[in-house]
Every structure is written in structure tokens, then in C-alpha cells.
Image (cartoon, grey):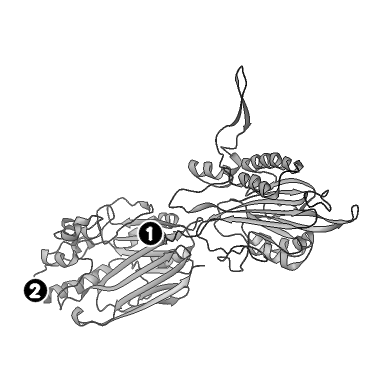
Amino acid sequence: MCVTFIYLNDKAVDDPKSYQLIVLNNRDELFDRPTLSPTWKDGRDQADPYGGTWLGMSRDGRLGNVLAVLENATDEIPCKIVYEYLKSEMPPEDYVAEQLSKEAQQYNGFNVILLHRLFNEEIERKTYFGVQFSNRQGSPTAAFGPGIYGFGNSVLGKPFKKITYGLRLFEEKLKILDDENVNEQELMKQFLDILIDQTSNYLKAQQANTQKENIISLFFSHYPDEQLISQKKQDKDRCKLMSQLFYEFPEPLRYGTRCHTIVLVNGVGRCTYFERSRKQITPHNPDAKYKLILLNNRDELLNRPTSTARWENGILAGRDERESIRGTWLCMNAIGSISNLLAITVPIHQMKSSSLTVTRGQILLSVYYVIYSILYNLILDYNGALPVDFVKSNKKPEEFCKLLINTVNRYNAFQILCFQRNEYDQYEVAGLTYQPDDKIEVTRYPPGIHGFSNSPSCEPFKKVQRDPRMFCRCYPDDQLKRRCGRSSELCKYRAAIFVRYPDGIPYGTRSHTIIIVDRNNRATYYEKSMETGAGKASEATWSERIFHFELI
């Protein structure tokens, strides 16, 4: 959500106190999106692979501004448009006709405003004119000359109410141009007042007191805005905030107006380019540096063939080499989508297997785990492909989980968690838990601290519960014992976060994974794992690897 207001005046000739061009712009974006301050030619969006910009200007006075059309799509707009226009030195109409229009439909919706100075034969001076173009609703290229204009994130011809409201404010402020006592500094202050306006009330009133009565006159109402609501599904509170010229969403959604720009070009061609921007990170708050931290322990048979984490076909993961589909328990792709699969522990007799008696002898316990693993993976389909399916699907977490409901009965009991960055570049998390005879529901998890294990999140084991007292009483755990259906001796080991059985029982924690994504979308993927084929946990060899990369 951005706004731009433009004033073009072809009468400002050879007069340093009059203005040929005035541009006011608010950039609404993620507060932590890497961005450079303006330099020649522009302020740069570091997250854009082309080093593009939302607003740029060249030394000869050409100016470009691109605004996204608000819609449900989450892909980014092509910020390279402005940079390429400024670099091309083509007249705006030629740039649109020969270059932009040919590739415009491959992008999400956008509006672009291109300004250029041309020689005016009537006054024998260069004056500004503009061209606007949109790739939505078949909008034709439209040229515009002297006047006052407002642009936003709506389709052309259907402005949001706040644009109409901002134009009225702009028209009022422009009247001070006739006051010879107003200097440029005061002018900047007046224009900045427009860009920081937070009005979104149902009614905006002006009150004048007289000796007889108070006179209340309706000035303008720009909330609710039916056009804004029609373009994107948003809840009421977000719509109200977005109907303001200046706004910011409440934490943890660090999104809103983060930059004000004012450009003035006077009658003799002198330009003033002013920018006020919000800092990207609050350095003194260490809790605000990371948008995601994920810690995972994988508990499995110590001799189960497993490859260590590596990039393969665009996915970073360790792989289960025992299965032909080479699934995984945890994976991540280059855009930051993540999925984690956890088996739901159930007693072996609930898996349609033959009865099996377990004694305390370590040899029998070892045999029990081998048989248990074979039965667990052969009764139904292997579900290790599901995490890979999600990160390759481009579906939202909740959507993927809902589609999965129709096929869950093919698998043994499991819990899957899906993580994905949303349009505000914050993580959304959804999960699905399946166990026979239980209602299957998709759960969305709000921002915060969550713990998951081999039990449904509504019935967590003590070792993942968020309670400081649990550090000293994770055992005995009645929920774990009920689900395992095993002896108290076995359950004692399973109650720990790091599971390590006595030598002779080839099962336990065999890898640790840590995933961190900071607010600048720098990702760290760390894995420490036990070498495959370890006969005894006490003699196992561990190795580690770490990956650093920028999310795309």
C-alpha cells in the first residue's frame, strides 16, 4: 500500500519561488526489508534481485514511481521498471510501447508513473508531463499534463478513498505557494503533514465556534472503503488501518508506512529531494532480530540408512535412504518454506500387528524396536514424502493441510507442520494431526513459542510443555506411557528431550537441526547427526554441517 501525489505546473518559468514539479510519496512495505537510502539514481530495494526501486530520479529530471495493485497474489511487483526507465533515456510513451507493455502481463498488478521534461515551444522552456500505465483491466497508456494527481494501489480510475482525501489535503496545502513569505522548509513541513496523516475515522469534521452555536461540517469519510475491501480479503482492523495515508500494523506484523519522499523542482530547475525513512531493525531489542527459530531432534533407529543434509533439487534436507522416494522428516527451500514431520506414537497393538510381549531384557527390547520399526513402516504408506510435497507445492500451509485430509488414511499416525512467509514477509504456520478414529482438523498457530513432539499438540508430552516446573518433573509422563504402551523403564528414557537408551537398544536421538531466519531474510541451517550404522549410542560418531543463504 503506497500513495503518490503529483503537482505539475507549466507556468513556473525562471522563477525560483515557483515549482514546476512537486511529488509526495509514501512507501508502505515490510519494516525489515533491506533497503538502501537514496543515492544517485534512487533509493534501492536490496531484496529485489535487480536492485530495483519504487521511486527514482535522474539528473536530467526524469522520475519514475511504481505502485503495486492491491490483490490476493503474493508475488512482488517488478521494481526494476523504474530503474530501467531512468537508464533507457527513452520518452515515457516509447518506453511503455516498446518495452514495458510487452512484458507487463507476466507480473502481478502494478501502476507506474513516468515523468519527463520536454521542450515547450510556446514558452521556449522545458516543462514536465507524465504517463501512467497499468497492467490491470486493460488500462491504456494515459498521458497527463499540468494539474494535481493522486495514485495508489487501486486499479486506475477506481481510487481508494484515502487518495481522494489526500488530494483534497494536497490542494489545500498548495494554496500556500501564493504566500511569498513561506520558505521551502515550511513548505516541506506542510507536505509532510499530509504523508503522516493517520485519519481513518468514520467522519472527519471541522468545527467552528460562533457566539450562537457550534457548527459541525462533514469534511470527508474514507472508511470503510468498498474499493479497498473488494481488491483483497482483509479483516476489519487491517482494512481500517490501510485506509489511512500513514499506518502500521500492530506487532508482530512489522508492516506499514516506512518511508516518506518529497521532491520539489522549482522554476529554474533546482531540485530538492527529501526522504524520511524508518529504521529497519531495532538493534537494542535482541528478541526482535529473528522471525523464525526452529529446533528439531530426530529420534529414529540408529542404523536406519540416512543421508546428511544437503541441497538436492532445490530442497535442503537430510534424506531417508531406506525408502525409494527418499523422503525426509524436515526440509526447507530457497524461499524459506519449511515442513517438519513427526510420527505420532501409538501402541504397537493399534497398528494391526500381532501381539508382542516386551520384557525388561535388553536383547528382547532391541528385538522389539526392530520389529516395531518394520511394522510401523510396512503397514501403511511411507509419509516421509509429505514435507517435500509441501515445499514444492507453492500452496499456503493451511491450504496444503486441508487438501491432505482426503488422503491421510493411507499413512500411519503423524503430525505435519508447514511454515511459509506470507505477503507481509512474516511466517504463517499451520499443521495437521492424524491418528485413526480421531477428528482430523487443521490448526493455525499464532506467533509465539510452540512445542511439538510425537503426541498431538492438544495432548503434549511433558517434555515439550511450556512450564518452567517441567524441567524437574518430565517423568513420569502418563500421556507418554499411555501412547507408548510400554514399560516404565522404556518410558523413562523417552521422557527426555535427548533420547538415549542403554547400549543394545538401537534407537534414540540421532540428529539435531536448528533453523534460524533473521529479519533481513538471512537463513542459517545447522545439522549435527550421528553417523549411520552406529551399533552403540555411546560409541557413535557425530558430524556437523552448516548452511548460510539469503532467502529469495
Residue that label 1 marks: 287
Query: In terms of depth relative to the viewer, which is nearer, 201 or 458?
Result: 201
Q: Position of residue 508 (x, y in %)?
A: 22, 72
Counting the numbered discs, the total is 2
The local crowd at label 1, few if under 14, some if 14 to 19, many if 20 or more residues have their Cα within 10 Å, is: few
Helix, strand or loop for disc 1 = helix
Q: Quadrant of residue 270?
A: bottom right
Against 445, residue 489 (above or below) is below
Against 416, residue 242 (above or below) is above
Chain-order first, disc 1 or disc 2: 1
Q: Position of residue 95 (x, y in %)?
A: 76, 63
Query: In terms of depth relative to the viewer, which is nearer, 499 or 267?
Result: 267
The local crowd at label 2, few if under 14, some if 14 to 19, many if 20 or more residues have their Cα within 10 Å, is: few
Residue that label 2 marks: 361
Q: Is residue 18 left or right of residue 228?
A: right
Q: Is residue 23 left or right of residue 419?
A: right
Q: Is residue 366 left or right of residue 396?
A: left
Q: Is residue 338 left or right of residue 362?
A: right
Residue 91 in sight = yes
| Residue type of the residue flagged with mark 1 | Asp
Q: Position of residue 132 (x, y in %)?
A: 73, 53
Q: Quadrant of residue 89?
A: bottom right
Query: In terms of depth relative to the viewer, which is nearer, 177 or 316?
Result: 177
Res. 258 mark: none
- Outermost residue on the top side: it is 212
Q: Are marks 1 and 2 in contact (CB under 8 Å)?
A: no
Q: Quadrant of residue 43?
A: bottom right
Structural distance between the alpha carbons of marks 1 and 2: 48 Å
Q: Position of residue 103 (x, y in %)?
A: 69, 63
| Residue type of the residue flagged with mark 2 | Gly
Mark in front: 1 vs 2: 1
Helix, strand or loop for disc 2 = loop
